């Protein structure tokens, strides 16, 4: 039985929300580790899961494009825009992962903060459309995680990072 566009669209929306949940969790774990000066390994693992879930989401977007003969991509602004968004998001995910440990230098952290806010705005915009009842809860969790994450920006750096910052 071939995949219909409605099912493919639902799959893309569901994977987008799952990716949003992993992003929220990664921000919260990263902030907790920084504020408590604990191991960043759990946060890095979740950032890895975030990258994996984002990749699965992009695969469902490609599947949706295939079953709609490209109409879904055209409605989203065209292939150029979609590919730019994907490239920038992978760069941002890499920076977020790289800066989630105590050894990250302040410059990498500041760049990652920009990407974290950018991702939060993207997910916030998607959740604010309220296609599902769950979107209200996800929007609230995202806002709380972003505030918690932003609070961690002002925590003192561990000694190792202070030495690296020079």
Image: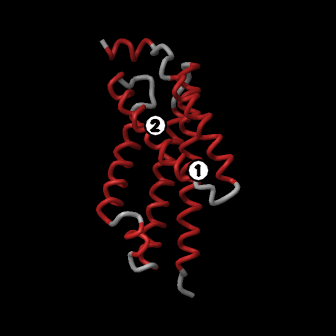
Query: Looking at the rendered structure, which numbered label has been put on residue 94?
Result: none
Q: Quadrant of the N terminus?
A: bottom right
If you read the primary sequence from the N terminus, does the residue marked by circle 1 or circle 2 appear first? Answer: 2
Whether 63 is drawn above or below 76: the answer is below
Judged from this view, the residue extending furthest toward the bottom is: 1
Image position of 148 with respect to 129: above or below? above
Closer to the eye: label 1 or 2? 1
Q: Secondary structure at mark 2?
A: helix
User: Relative to 89, is 25 above or below?
Assistant: above
The residue lying toward the viewer, choosing from 45 and 22, is 22
Task: Answer with the quarter of the image where residue 6 lies.
Answer: bottom right
Residue name at image x 38 percent, y 75 percent: 70
Q: Which labelled disc corresponds to residue 117? A: 2
Circle 1 sits on which residue?
Answer: 128
> Callout 1: helix, strand or loop?
loop
Q: Quadrant of residue 17?
A: bottom right
Q: Which quadrant would residue 76 be assigned to in this image?
A: bottom left
Q: Residue at x 58, y 68 (%)?
A: 10
């Amino acid at each position: 039985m071939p995949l219909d566009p409605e099912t493919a669209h639902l799959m893309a929306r569901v994977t987008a929300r799952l990716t949003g949940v992993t992003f929220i969790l990664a921000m919260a774990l990263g902030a907790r580790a920084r504020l408590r000066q604990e191991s960043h390994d759990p946060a890095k693992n979740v950032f890895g899961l975030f990258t994996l879930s984002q990749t699965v989401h992009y695969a469902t977007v490609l599947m949706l494009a295939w079953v709609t003969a490209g109409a879904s991509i055209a409605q989203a602004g065209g292939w150029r825009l979609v590919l730019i968004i994907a490239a920038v998001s992978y760069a941002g995910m890499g920076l977020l992962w790289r800066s989630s440990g105590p050894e990250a230098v302040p410059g990498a952290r500041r760049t990652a903060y920009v990407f974290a806010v950018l991702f939060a705005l993207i997910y916030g915009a998607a959740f604010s459309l309220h296609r599902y009842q769950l979107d209200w809860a996800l929007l609230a969790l995202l806002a709380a995680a972003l505030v918690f994450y932003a609070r961690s920006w002002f925590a003192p750096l561990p000694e190792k990072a202070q030495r690296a910052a020079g």
